[in-house]
Amino acid sequence: MADKPKRPLSAYMLWLNSARESIKREHPGIKVTEVAKKGGELWRGMKDKSEWEAKAAKAKDDYDRAVKEFEANGGSSAA
């Protein structure tokens, strides 16, 4: 039987995954923890997050659909 679907990423995490390389390019030698910190600063400063929020909403809808299908096919809702 297939494993239970993984929870979807948040809008911030989707954005950070796409922006991580550019943050590293702009700040050579930056530590992993500092990439996340810098990403947080950039995310808080963003005015328009609608693209990422829409992607996160779609991922959540896909996840909800996958969980229902998983449970309908005999999967357990218990973790």
Image: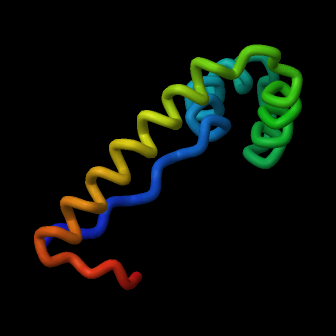
Residue 31, above or below 75? above
Residue 68 to residue 30: above or below: below
Type of colouring:
rainbow
| Residue plotted at (81% across, 15% down) | 47
Snapshot quadrant of residue 49: top right
Observer-nearest of 50 and 42? 50
**What is the quadrant of residue 7 in the picture?**
bottom left
Rendered image quadrant of residue 43: top right
**Position of residue 4 measured from the top left corner of the image (x, y, whole percent):** 29, 68
Of 5 and 50, the residue lying toward us: 50
Residue 51 in the image, given as x and y percentages of width and height: 58, 18
Q: Furthest residue to the bottom?
A: 78
Residue found at x 11% / y 70%:
73
Vertical placement of 76 versus 64: above or below?
Answer: below
Identify the residue at horizontal 39%, vertical 43% (top origin): 61
Side (left or right) of 73 relative to 49: left
For this view, does 58 lie left or right of residue 20? left
* As drawn, 36 above or below 46: below
Q: Which residue is drawn at 32% across and 60% down?
A: 5
